[in-house]
Amino acid sequence: MNLTENEIITQQLECFGQVETGKQLKDMTTFRIGGSVSFVSYPRNMFALSRLIDFLIENDVPYKIIGKGSNLICSDDAYSGVIIRLDRTMNHWYLNDQKLIAEAGASIIALSVFAAKNGLSGLEWASGIPATVGGCVFNNAGAYNFSMSDSVLRVLILDQGEFRWLSAEQCGFSYRSSVFHSNPQWIILAIEFALTKKDEQEIWAVMDQRKQRRMESQPLDFPSAGSIFRNPSSESAWSLIEQSGLRGLSIGGAQVSAKHCNFIINVQDARAQDVRDLIDLVIRKVEEKTKVRLQTEVEMFNWNHTKIRHQSKR
Ligand SMILES: Cc1cc2nc3c(=O)[nH]c(=O)nc-3n(C[C@H](O)[C@H](O)[C@H](O)COP(=O)(O)OP(=O)(O)OC[C@H]3O[C@@H](n4cnc5c(N)ncnc54)[C@H](O)[C@@H]3O)c2cc1C
């Protein structure tokens, strides 16, 4: 039997964990947009992940780690490389006194519920974010004046085949950013949180209030990538978009949400290009009207004219 090149690569990748072929990025992102990918790999554990990365680099195969794909706008082009996901296998956590240690592929929603059940406060803000813990550290995700950096004690990373801990300070957290943005070859493996003891009912009350607020203010019934633009220091992005009369504006299947105009939603089979064109139009119109140039908070992935993360060689 003659094996195709893809079958040979699949067999090699299977040494490190489960492998899937024939998948599309639109099935791995909350925007439900994105082209086909050659392989999806779910490494069994951090050691297998380390060997997998060595294998991919040695064989010059592009790769990209993703979490829940909730901050990505992927092109409709095919991605000839390996998407690495940690959310099926590297998704455990344990509690030691008040220190919670979670693997990067764990769901931040599940983790915040676990913290609440154990009377630990610090992750209430995160209970509605459809993301992994690793993705939240990468972006220093946050809401309601709290962010990941408020409760991260240290982060275990994989850097050029070595495992090492970074202190919170070394993570260089800032508004929706961290040191990982400028070191895309580092892989976040686990996070140690310092949480505070609090009455469980109080924690649930805050979480319920946040949930209610999200449901009232965000278009959660449509696929999206959350807030599209960063809030400029002067004013919130949604307010600038509103003042520019862009609420409900659409291109193809993509629309500036009428419910929350810093969300672009996929109302009907939007093409990736529809979303990009709409983003560009919003930036242009807001600048014309308010003189403020909006910056995107979302990350573009697999657009041939943009820098693709995780593809550089060591
Ligand atoms: C409905 C909705 C609501 C949202 N609400 C909020 C909110 O309130 N606050 C907020 O800040 N964001 C929000 N977001 C945006 C998004 O959830 C965050 O940006 C989140 O941090 C992305 O996490 P992820 O696991 O989905 O990462 P992905 O989007 O999959 O990846 C983001 C980046 O992180 C990198 N990455 C992921 N995991 C690792 C890892 N283990 N090691 C190294 N790099 C890694 C990826 O390579 C990529 O560059 C929302 C999104 C949606 C769809």
Image (cartoon, rainbow, N blue to C red):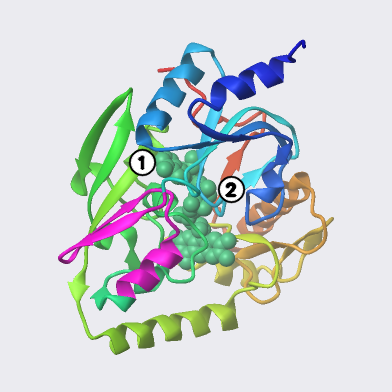
Residue 145, picture quadrant: bottom left
Identified at 43% across, 66% down, the residue is 110
* Quadrant where the image shows the N terminus: top right
Pick the front one: 212 or 81: 81
Identified at 36% across, 74% down, the residue is 124
Q: Is residue 80 above or below residue 299?
A: above
Q: Is residue 231 visible?
A: no
Q: Is residue 108 magenta?
A: yes
Give the labeled residue for mark 2: 72
Say which mark, if any, is on residue 132. none
Residue 178, position in %: x, y?
34, 45
Task: For ligand 1, tell me if the residue under mark 1 lies within 8 Å.
Answer: yes
Q: Is residue 242 above or below residue 18?
A: below
Q: Amino acid at mark 2?
A: Leu
Identified at 63% across, 51% down, the residue is 29
Give the labeled residue for mark 1: 188
Residue 224, position in %: x, y?
65, 60
Q: Is residue 209 above or below residue 148?
A: below
What secondary structure is marked by label 1? strand
The boundaries of the magenta stretch are 91-116
* Quadrant where the image shows the C terminus: top left
Residue 136, position in %: x, y?
41, 54
Q: Amino acid at mark 1?
A: Ile
Task: For ligand 1, tell me if the residue under mark 2 lies within 8 Å.
Answer: yes
